[in-house]
C-alpha cells in the first residue's frame, strides 16, 4: 500500500510541476500518508513545495490531536509543512447534502444536512484554534458557511486568538449578510473557478434554482467586501492546471451565456492564484510575488496572458517551472532562456 501511495504521489507531483505549480496546498492528507511525502523528498523527487492539512473525519477522537500536533513538529520546513486541519460541515448541492438556509429548489422537503451539530462543531473548532492550527472547513451551502463563520468567531473570542487565517473551502452559496463577515473575521474564502462553469453545473443549478444560481460563487462581492479571496483547483474534481482556472475566472458566463458580473480581471485572477494563494496557506513571507528575498519559484509560459484573447488563455503552455532557482520541469523542445 505504501509503495502504491508513493508511486501515485510521484506521478501527481510530476503533473503539478508540468502545470507550473511551485507550491501545492494539499488540503486533505490522511495522517498516515505524510510519510509518503517525506519518502519522496528523501529520494530527491519532491519538486513542489507542500503545505498540508490533516484530514479530521467526524469520528476523530480528541486524543488524536496530539498526533496532529506531533506531525506539525516533524514536518515544519518550506518543503513539507503541516499546520492545518481539514474539517467538513456539509456536502455538495448536487446530492442535496450541502447545508442550505432555505429548502432545495428540486426537493422542498430538505435543506441538506450537516456533518456535526453546531455545538459539537464549535467545540472542535475552538480546541483546534487553541492549539494553533489553521482550520480549513469544507462548506458549500450558505447554512454550512454560516455555521463555519460562527464557529471561527466564537473560537477567536473564547481563545483570545487572531491571525489564524482560517479558511472556508468552496463557499458556493452565500447569504449576502455573511459576505461581509469574511474580512471582519479574517477568514479566507478559497474558491475554485471551474466549479462555477455553466457546462459543469447543470445538476447544481437544478438543485438550488435560478435565484441562488445568479448570486452563487460571488467572487466580486467578496473582494468588494474586503475578503482575502484565493483560488484553487480542487483537483482531481477539476483540472489541476491553474491556467484553465484563470481562463474560467476571466471569461465566466451566466447559464444564459451573458458575461457574469462575478468575473475577475486577468491581473485579479492571477493574483488569486499567486499572492493571495500564498497568503491563504500562510506562506506569503517567502512566495507569491516576484520580490527580492523571496524564493526563486516561478513559471515560464509560452504566451503572455495579459496580451492574448481571454478565451485563448488556456492555450498557454508551461515551458519551464523553477523552484528554489532549480529547473524542475522543462517542456520538450523548450530551450533555456
Image (spheres, rainbow, N blue to C red):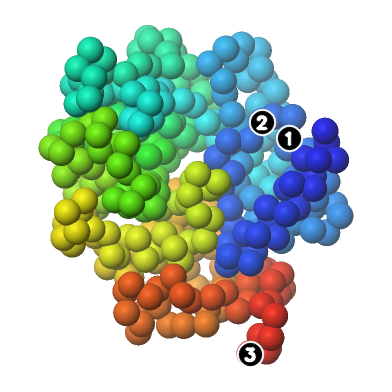
| Relative to 245, residue 170 above or below | above
Residue 11 lies in quadrant: bottom right
Residue at label 2? Answer: 30
Judge from the rendering whether residue 267 lies leftward or rightward of residue 316; answer left or right.
left
Q: CA distance from mark 2 to mark 1?
A: 5 Å
Q: Secondary structure at mark 1?
A: helix
Nearer-N-terminus badge (3/2): 2
Indicate whether 59 appears above or below 311: above
Is residue 271 visible to us here? no
Which quadrant holds residue 155? top left
Crowding near pointer 1: few (<14 within 10 Å), some, many (20+)?
Answer: some
Q: Quadrant of residue 264?
A: bottom left
Quarter of the image with the N terminus in it: top right
Give the Cα separation between the discs numbered 3 and 2.
40 Å
Residue at (26, 30) in percent of width and height: 207
First in sequence: mark 1 vs mark 3: 1
Disc 3, SS: loop
The picture places residue 226, in percent across and down from the top left corner, at: 24, 50
Given contact means CB atoms under 8 Å apart, are the residues at marks 2 and 1 in contact?
A: yes
Which residue is label 1 attached to? 33
Compute the Cα span from label 1 to label 3: 37 Å
Nearer the observer, 141 or 85:
141
Q: Which quadrant does the C terminus fall into?
A: bottom right
Q: Is 292 or 146 nearer to us in this picture?
A: 146
Q: Which residue is mark 3?
A: 337
The spot of residue 320 in percent (x, y) is 63, 77
Image spot of residue 111 (x, y percent): 26, 18
In the image, what residue occupies the spot 81% across and 40% down? 4
Amino acid at each position: 500500500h505504501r509503495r502504491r501511495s508513493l508511486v501515485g504521489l510521484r506521478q501527481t507531483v510530476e503533473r503539478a510541476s508540468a502545470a507550473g505549480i511551485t507550491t501545492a496546498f494539499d488540503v486533505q492528507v490522511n495522517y498516515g500518508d505524510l510519510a509518503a511525502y517525506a519518502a519522496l523528498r528523501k529520494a530527491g523527487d519532491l519538486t513542489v513545495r507542500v503545505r498540508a492539512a490533516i484530514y479530521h473525519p467526524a469520528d476523530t477522537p480528541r486524543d488524536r490531536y496530539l498526533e496532529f500536533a506531533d506531525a506539525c513538529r516533524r514536518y515544519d520546513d518550506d518543503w513539507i509543512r503541516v499546520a492545518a486541519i481539514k474539517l467538513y460541515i456539509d456536502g455538495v448541492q448536487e446530492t442535496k447534502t450541502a447545508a442550505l438556509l432555505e429548502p432545495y429548489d428540486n426537493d422542498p422537503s430538505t435543506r441538506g444536512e450537516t456533518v456535526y451539530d453546531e455545538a459539537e462543531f464549535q467545540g472542535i473548532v475552538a480546541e483546534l484554534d487553541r492549539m494553533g492550527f489553521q482550520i480549513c472547513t469544507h462548506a458549500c451551502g450558505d447554512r454550512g458557511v454560516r455555521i463555519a463563520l460562527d464557529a471561527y468567531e466564537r473560537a477567536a473570542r473564547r481563545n483570545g486568538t487572531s491571525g489564524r487565517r482560517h479558511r472556508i473551502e468552496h463557499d458556493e452559496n452565500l447569504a449576502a449578510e455573511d459576505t461581509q463577515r469574511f474580512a471582519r473575521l479574517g477568514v479566507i474564502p478559497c474558491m475554485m473557478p471551474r466549479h462555477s462553469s455553466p457546462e459543469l453545473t447543470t445538476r447544481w443549478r437544478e438543485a438550488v434554482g435560478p435565484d441562488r444560481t445568479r448570486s452563487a460563487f460571488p467572487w466580486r462581492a467578496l473582494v468588494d467586501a474586503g475578503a482575502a479571496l484565493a483560488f484553487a483547483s480542487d483537483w482531481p474534481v477539476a483540472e489541476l492546471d491553474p491556467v484553465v482556472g484563470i481562463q474560467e475566472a476571466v471569461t465566466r458566463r451566466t447559464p444564459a451565456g451573458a458575461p457574469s458580473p462575478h468575473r475577475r480581471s486577468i491581473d485579479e485572477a492571477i493574483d488569486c492564484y499567486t499572492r493571495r494563494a500564498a497568503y491563504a496557506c500562510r506562506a506569503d513571507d517567502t512566495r507569491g510575488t516576484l520580490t527580492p528575498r523571496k524564493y526563486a519559484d516561478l513559471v515560464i509560459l509560452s504566451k503572455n496572458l495579459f496580451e492574448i484573447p481571454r478565451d485563448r488563455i488556456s492555450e498557454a503552455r508551461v515551458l519551464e517551472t523553477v523552484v528554489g532557482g532549480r529547473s524542475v520541469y522543462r517542456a520538450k523542445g523548450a530551450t533555456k532562456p
